[in-house]
Image (tube, rainbow, N blue to C red):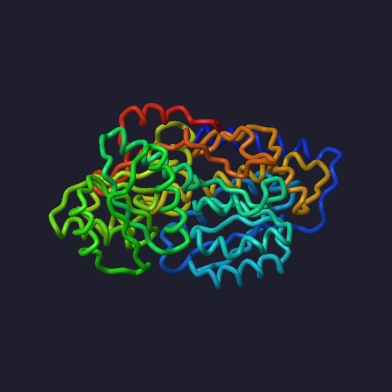
Amino acid sequence: MKHTQVTRLAILTAFVLSLFAGTAIAQGNTFKIGIIGPFTGASADFGNPMLNGIKLAVDEINAVGGYLGKPLELVVKDDKANPDEGLKQSQALIAEKVNVVVGFCNTGVAAKSLDVFQNAQVPLIIPCSTGSPLTAKFPAPQSYIFRTSAKDAIQAPFVVEDIVKRGWTKVAIFADKSGYGEAGLQDVLKAMDAKKIKPVHVARFDVGVKDLSEEMKAAKAAGADVVFSYTVGPENAVIAKAKQAIGWKVPQVGAWPLSFPFFLDGAKDAAEGALMAQTFIAEPSNERRASFLTAYARKYQAKRITVPMAAAQGYDAMYILMYSMFNVRDGNASGAAIKTALENMSRVYYGVVATYDKPFSANDKDAITSNMLVMGQVKNGLITFAYPEDAKRNLIVQRKQ
């Protein structure tokens, strides 16, 4: 076992032992955590890495006593990337009286279920969905919705800043008509407006579209020098192939879905050079990341994580939850107590994606800030750092700003 893992487990063991001293144990034999995401269907390529990251953390935490000596029990529900199914499974989690829920990969699926958790006062920690409205739906002090992924309101400006730095200012935007695409489009337009840039072409399309050649020709005719895509599935590859089909070699940029297998495997050589925002790139840039990658590969016999960000953010979400729960000294596992604990995490967690020093507060439910982002690039079918300085900066894990 790597040194970082040993250290983390030793810290957790010390925490658990200290909590046993004079502490009442909450009722029940386990601490029940609901997990929801797309584990089958179109979005399983990032739903399953999220689940695997969560399970890896849970195994480590249970190995040192769980929460107050109670093992963590996962109640897993598959939303199949379908909003109606997500609502049904969210209601099922509440009916099963879970203490807290971790999940959602699709913004539209999450959006339809937020009221379920808010009304039940069961905290929801979102490790993957990035749609900006998710953590803004309810007034922050009353909100039970937390997130450990980078919302699009910071990803979009980060990418816009990069394209301006590279001298590209004639932007064609391709956004799908899902909740994710709509929210992302608005974030891109807002970020471009801040730079006094207007898109030369905006293409909207349905999820599942197979050909965007005509829209790509229109973007080229408008004089675009970069294509900014906002979609979560195979449509990113459709965009790249349409660009390739007309012999147009302008760059493609976007948010984190450009690192997904649907894009890399679907577009193949047409994906080469694409740029995207990332919180975590699967390179052993420091000891804790090397430890995580080694542990994941060993547990799942995986040479490659399909979506490393989903795995790392799921893993970190579970540790943030447990580090927060160490503030609950009386074993109170009510939703209100967990919410307060998340908002007042007193111990620093040295995570895979970031160093989490007070990741949440009563007025801020997003753990990731823009300084934690790096620009990734497709090189030989894999995601690596777009800039050598980012690789060097990544040696030091960032804290929230």
Q: Which of 255 and 40 is in front in this view?
A: 255
Q: Which of 325 and 176 is in front in this view?
A: 176
The image shows residue 220 at horizontal and vertical percentages of: 19, 53
Question: Which residue shows up at 41% across the image and 53% down it?
Answer: 185
Question: Which residue shows up at 31% across the image and 39% down it?
Answer: 163
Using the image, determine if residue 96 lies above or below residue 327. Answer: below
Left or right of 225? Residue 86 is: right
Question: Which residue shows up at 24% across the image and 62% down it?
Answer: 215
State the residue lying farthest toward the left: 247
Using the image, determine if residue 364 lies above or below residue 94. Answer: above
Identify the image quadrant of the C terminus: top right
The image shows residue 177 at horizontal and vertical percentages of: 41, 64
Q: Nearer the viewer, residue 291 or 36?
A: 36
Left or right of 71? Residue 211 is: left
The image shows residue 368 at horizontal and vertical percentages of: 53, 40
Is residue 58 visible in the rendered structure shown here?
A: yes
Q: Nearer the viewer, residue 258 or 301?
A: 258
Which quadrant of the structure image shows residue 13? Answer: top right
**Number of numbered markers:** 0
Is residue 55 visible in the rendered structure shown here?
A: no
Which quadrant of the structure image shows residue 282? Answer: top left
Question: Which residue shows up at 28% across the image and 54% down it?
Answer: 201
Using the image, determine if residue 70 lies above or below residue 362. Answer: below
